[in-house]
Amino acid sequence: MVGSLSLMTWRQREFLSGLGWSPTHRNPIQWPSILLLGPDGWIVGLTFVTCGLLVILFSAFVFRSDRGRLIRAASIMLGATGVVLTLLAIPPVPRAAVQWASLHDLIYPLLPLAWIASAVLLSLGIGSNETWRTVRNVSVALLVMFLFSLLLTGVPQIAQLARNFAFGAQLAWLSLLSIAFAARASSDTPSGLSRR
């Protein structure tokens, strides 16, 4: 996802420049959503759909891998994150063009909410074995980074930059979780994942 969005940002730099987009300041339509409106917007939409479906599949794997209530609840919220990410492929509508919020704008706030719920539930549900304790500790650190970055999006001069850190925390968490579950799947020893 990072590679695709970075490439699309570079390819559509003239389009973004024409709109007065800033990589640091608040913009009328924020990145990466603004990329959906450009000439290669369909590639960005396809990226959202592909990544969303992968997150949904991963959430199903997490759900099936553990019977703990909190882990299963976390996997459901992770699946909701994937659904929202998939739906974000619907391009935003510039506010000047309509008097109401676009479907994209209505769906977007659900992404951080679903991710936060998933990260919190997973952190609470993880057992005490050393591998999962590390996953829990890093999850909590990334959650704090995400929430701090989210607060900083309220500062217009650095709003876009803060969003990039928030997205980075989400992607780092998904990567960490994927690696931990892949290691667990390849191991024959009990995982000690769930504490309840």
Image (tube, rainbow, N blue to C red):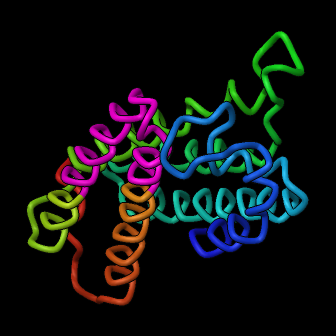
Q: Which image quadrant is residue 173 in?
A: bottom left
Q: Between 170 and 10, which is closer to the camera in this rendering?
A: 10
Left or right: 163 as drawn, with respect to 188: right
Q: Position of residue 117 (x, y in %)?
A: 38, 37
Residue 82 position (above or below residue 192) = above
Name the residue at the top extreme.
Answer: 99
Q: Which image quadrant is residue 179 in?
A: bottom left
Residue 190 colored magenta? no
Left or right: 51 as drawn, with respect to 111: right
Q: Between 161 and 124, which is closer to the camera in this rendering?
A: 161
Q: Position of residue 25 (x, y in %)?
A: 51, 40
Is the N terminus in the top left, top right, bottom left or bottom right quadrant? Answer: bottom right
Q: Position of residue 87 (x, y in %)?
A: 74, 43
Residue 151 colored magenta? yes
Residue 96 position (above or below residue 61) = above
Question: Which residue is pictured at 30% across the width and 88% down the height?
Answer: 187
Q: Main secondary structure of the magenta part?
A: helix
Q: Between 132 and 48, which is closer to the camera in this rendering?
A: 48
